[in-house]
Amino acid sequence: MFYHHGVNLMGDQQITVSHLGVSYRSLEALRDITLKVEAGKLTGIIGPNGAGKSTLIKAMLGLIPLTQGSVLYQGQPLNQKLNEVAYVPQRSQIDWTYPVTVWDVVMMGRVRHTGWFRNFSTASRRQALEALERVNMEAYRQRPIGELSGGQQQRVFLARSLAQNGSIFLFDEPFVGVDQKTENILFSIFRELAASGKIVLVVNHDLGESITNFDDLILLNRELIAHGKRQLVMRDNNLHQAYGGKVMFFNAQAA
């Protein structure tokens, strides 16, 4: 598969977050977050609205400043190794009126390898086409991105991330506004990426049955409530601490 290139040894394939803090003016958005995100596992970030899920990913990437702490990958700050990272933000943060085709978007994933002012190689074009085929969107390659459904748009951005051939994949709420077919495709590819030794971290708003797709979970509510294997994190006491007992949960402990 096209995303097996450049897999490192899993032992040094982890992101280490130490005492991370983020504040907006006087509001403390995240407090003293310490955890590890391991390669080879599909890891989800869960928590109520306003818990800091998206903030955690953005802070890890250096997109927003830290008030304290560090984020390391293979012993170096993660924001200095962004060539290893494929990041897909929330759909609401993307300008869908921008006049580009599906093919244009996926080829953007190859720019880092090729350079801005050089022609794309045959190999780059082949990898982009393989990525589109993997998400069942090759028939739409000349379609303007703004004409697609929400699920189709999400699959195109997944294809772009696959074309990057990175070691770290970060997705911010990829399942919002998508159909069941797209959700199944996303989870299938996320699992394959994890199985090939990648780091895969996904912000997930849904506590339904789909939660059983994750190996590890990070449960946040501005501070870290629990982190680790899904069955341990999804215990009633952790969930009630995070959500205040206002939400019905799928029983994922036994699943």
Image (tube, rainbow, N blue to C red):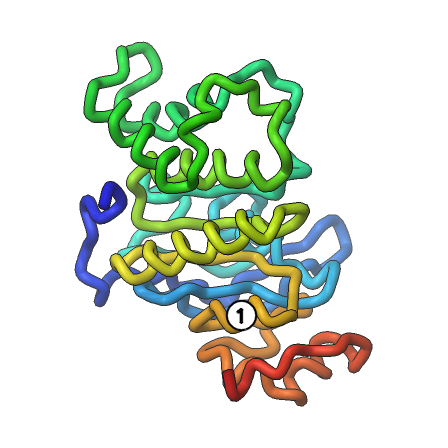
Rendered view: 241 above or below 51: below
**Farthest residue toward the right?**
246
The residue shown at (43%, 38%) is 136
Q: Residue 113 at what x, y percent from top left?
A: 27, 27
Does residue 177 appear to the left or right of 245 in the view shown? left
Q: Which residue is mark 1?
A: 218
Note whether 35 is above or below 109 in the view shown.
below
Residue 105 location (% of width, % of height): 46, 25
- Which image quadrant is residue 120 in? top left
- Callout 1 environment at 10 Å: few (<14), some (14 to 19), or many (20+)? many
Label 1 sits on a secondary structure element that is strand
Name the spot of residue 31 as percent of width and height, x first. Answer: 62, 66
Front residue of this view, candidates 83 and 151? 151
Q: Specify the amino acid type for callout 1.
A: Ile
Residue located at (54% from left, 40% from top): 154
Q: Is residue 71 above or below residue 224?
A: above
In the rendered view, does 32 fall on the left or right side of 77?
Answer: right
How many callouts does the rendering have?
1
Q: Quadrant of residue 17?
A: bottom left
Give the answer, above or below, for where 131 lies relative to 231: above
Foreground residue among 76 and 121? 121
Looking at the image, which is closer to me, 173 or 137? Answer: 137
Q: Residue at x 23, y 46 (%)?
A: 1
Q: Residue at x 54, y 86 (%)?
A: 253
Q: Is residue 110 left or right of residue 92?
A: left
Residue 141 percent across, percent down from the top left: 44, 23
